[in-house]
Amino acid sequence: MPTQNLPTTPRHRKILMLVQTRGYMSNEDLAQQLDVAVQTIRRDVNLLANQGYLARHHGGAGLPSSIENIAYDERQVLNQRAKDAIGRMAAELVPNRSTIFINIGTTTESFARALNEHRDLRVVTNNLHVASILSRRTDFRTVVAGGSIRPADGGIVGASAIESLESFRAEFGVIGISGIEEDGTLLDFDLDEIQCARAIIRHSRRVILLADHTKFGRHPMGRVGDLSDIDDFVTDQAPSPEFQARMAAANVTLHVARP
């Protein structure tokens, strides 16, 4: 945990903001952004890593934890323009009168907000925020999965939630994720959340993954699945050519939404 509330210098705060926004930054990129020597950045990264703000990697810095997600309030504002663009593009993939699963996450909440022009949707969700966003639409039918509410982010999890999700079948499963490995492995932090995401994947005819580019710099411990489990990937920046080749091999369609 950080030893103080905020880094003490403007440069340290800028480093932290850049890493939180992008998920990973090389020392060279940080030096260029801040117009300082790479050696200065190395010292700054070492200090911030020792204080718990960052994770020090070979040649750069990333987010600090692979076992605990960023707090929900912080995730709500982190990369929000990109998440909204992703949500709008994903909404274009879903026609009116569709049935949809929507899982936990701030990017899936952006997707829910982007459905305001749709008509006659049937939605099953384990995300209280998504349910609240959609609740005023009289032509939508929104079903909330039963289970335990997670106060930190409004997620509904547990054995009852999984059983509830598995009692439905939908045309679309719209899911978020906390991390993506370069080999295509999809990762998340919480075991209960992972089980709910897997239930959605199993019971959806078409799975749409929503993830901004920072998810490539994060490495949670829990495995949700891999590229073969999804049909569409909506993000805000094109991934590496190697990753795109893996997507093509898995018959995954890439959609890049520009904020």
Image: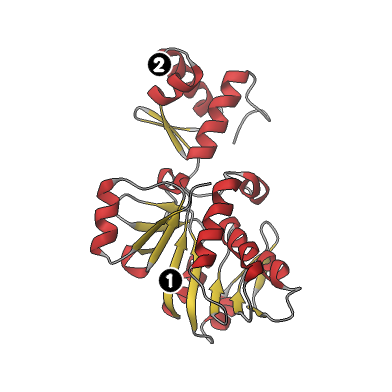
Q: Which residue is mark 1?
A: 207
- 139 relative position to 123: left or right: right
Instruction: Kindly identify the residue that appears in the image at 59 percent across and 46 percent down.
Output: 81
Towards the viewer: 80 or 91: 91
Asked if residue 214 is positioned above or below residue 100 in the image, the reply reads: above
Rendering coords of residue 60 (x, y %): 40, 29
Please state if 111 lies on the left or on the right of 237 as rendered: right
Foreground disc of the pair 2, 1: 1
Residue 153 image-quadrant placement: bottom right
Residue behind mark 2: 38
Across and down, in percent, residue 210 comes to: 48, 59
Disc 1 residue crowd, few under 14, some 14–19, many 20+, Cα 10 Å? many
* Quadrant of the image occupied by residue 184: bottom left
Relative placement, left or right, of 178 versus 243 is right
Task: Tell me, for residue 33, which label it has, or none.
Answer: none
Q: Secondary structure at mark 1?
A: strand
